Structure formats: structure tokens, C-alpha cells
Amino acid sequence: MESKLFRLKRIKSQFWRFFPVFFLLVSLFFIVFSLTQVVFVGQMKQTTLSVYNPVVSVIKEPVYWVRNGIEKIQDWIQTYQENEHLKEENEELLKWRSLAIQLKEEQKELKKYLNFTAPEKTKHLVAEVAMDEGSAFTRSFIVAAGANQGVTKGMLAFSPKGLFARVVEVMPNFSRIMTLTDYKSRVPVWIGENKVSALLIGDNTSRPFLQFLNENETVQKGEVVMTSGYVGVYPPGLLIGYVNEIQEDEVRVQPIENGEKLSFVRLIDFPLSKPLLEETE
């Protein structure tokens, strides 16, 4: 019988004899397994991509649509904000434009007064019209100048065209001027070259009428009507208007100025323009 030791040696010798073959087989197995894994992984990758691409294509469309919608909404919001800002700027520019037009018109009107030569030794000033108090019962204006600016009762009010009112009430910083068409107005006048005397009386219409005409004297349509200077309220020779209408019992005068749409007036204190003759209450 073989001893146990001898059997072990024989098995060991056989093992080392077959070991290279075994090692070779194991190596081939792993090589084949690796190649199989590579092919399997590649196939899995291709399969995954073939499934992934259509899914991504389907999913990305609404994502892009939502993103584009958000961008458009943001653009609309920005455009709306810009439009609102432009509207505010436009409104502000319109305000400045209106102010510029108003100042231009005021400057144009003030230039007319620069060409106005006041009589010597008279006190005068230009005042802005603050309020038109004209109504069916009165024809008067409030001007932004009063006692603090040197305005006194009885001063005459002129436009660039000529005389049209007089100061009847004075406050610290404002005054009221009454036009020649007011129903309280009474002005001694001359008519024409013959200086026919009469009294010009206002009746709240645009054309006051003449009263106390001498029956022996006649007036013609178109003749000049000017102040006569009687009783010291108005100095003589100031142009008022022209005879506009002649009827059997009435003669109407068209004033050269009605005071409408005036922004400024010139107030002049003539030496004779004192309220000695008060208007009828």
C-alpha cells in the first residue's frame, strides 16, 4: 500500500503539472466574460438610448413651450411697464407743453403792452387777470394787483386796443375792474368830429347805448366815440369805440375792447381819473 505521504506528493506533482492548463482556462474564461460584458453593456446602452431619446423628445416639447411662454410673459410685462412709463413721460411732456404754450401766449400779450406808451406823469402797472366775473348781471374782472401794488380806486384799465374798464374796488392784493358795458357804467363822451356830447350807458350787453343826445345834433354810423372828460372821472380824448347802430330812439356803440380773453391789463392813474361821479347803484 502506498503511504499517505506518497499519495500527497503524487497529487501535488499532478496539480503542478495541470496548473498551467487550469490557469489558462481560467484566464480564457475571464477574457470571454469581459468581452461578453462589453457587448452586453453596449447593447444595454443602445437599448437605453433608443428608449430615452423618444421619451426625452416627448418631454422636452412642453418644457420648451412652457419656457417660451414664460419668456413671452416676461417680455409682455416688461413692455407693459415700459408703456406705462412712456405714458407718464408723455403726460408730463404734455403738461410742460401746455405750460410752454401758455407762457408763450402771455409773453406775446405782454409784448403788446411794451409798445403801449402811458401818458407822462401818470402812475401805471400791468396786472394779470385772475378771474372773470362776467355774468348776466355784471361785467367785471378781478386782477392780481391791489393796494399793496399801488392800485387805487378810479384807475383806468387798458388793453393793447385801448380803454375798456376802470377800478371800482381795491383789496390788499386784488382789485375789481368794471367794464364800460356793465349796467352801472356811466361815461361822458364825445361823438365824431363835432364832439356831440352824450352819456354812454352800459346795460350788460356787448354794445352800450348813448343817452342825452341833443335833438338838434345828429350822429352817423361809424363815428368815433371818445371820453369827453366832463366831471373829472375820465380824461378827455380816450378812444372808446364807434357808433354801430342807429335807430329812432336808440344809438348803440361798439367798444374797441370787450375785455374777453384778456390775460393782462394795464392800470393807469390819470390825474383826472378820480371817482367824483359814482355809478348808479
Image (spheres, rainbow, N blue to C red):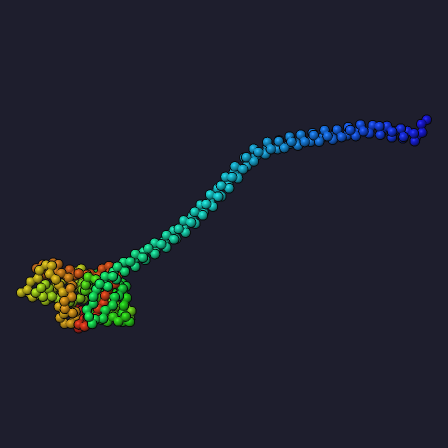
Identified at 62% across, 31% down, the residue is: 46
Identified at 54% across, 37% down, the residue is: 60
Farthest residue, direction top: 1
**In terms of depth relative to the viewer, which is nearer, 82 or 34?**
34
Identified at 45% across, 48% down, the residue is: 78
Farthest residue, direction left: 216
Count numbered badges in the picture: 0
Image x and y of residue 249, in percent: 9, 61
Dividing the picture into quarters, in which one does residue 241 lie? bottom left
**Position of residue 20 in the picture relative to residue 113 (left or right):** right
Q: Dividing the image into 4 quarters, which one contains the C terminus?
A: bottom left
Dividing the picture into quarters, in which one does residue 34 lie? top right
Image x and y of residue 238, in percent: 16, 66
Image x and y of residue 7, in percent: 90, 29
Decide: is 60 above or below 274: above
Q: Dividing the image into 4 quarters, which one contains the N terminus?
A: top right
**Position of residue 60 in the picture relative to residue 277 (left or right):** right
Can residue 173 be seen in the rendering of this structure? yes
**In terms of depth relative to the viewer, which is nearer, 17 or 35?**
17
Can residue 179 be seen in the rendering of this structure? no
Image x and y of residue 267, in percent: 23, 67
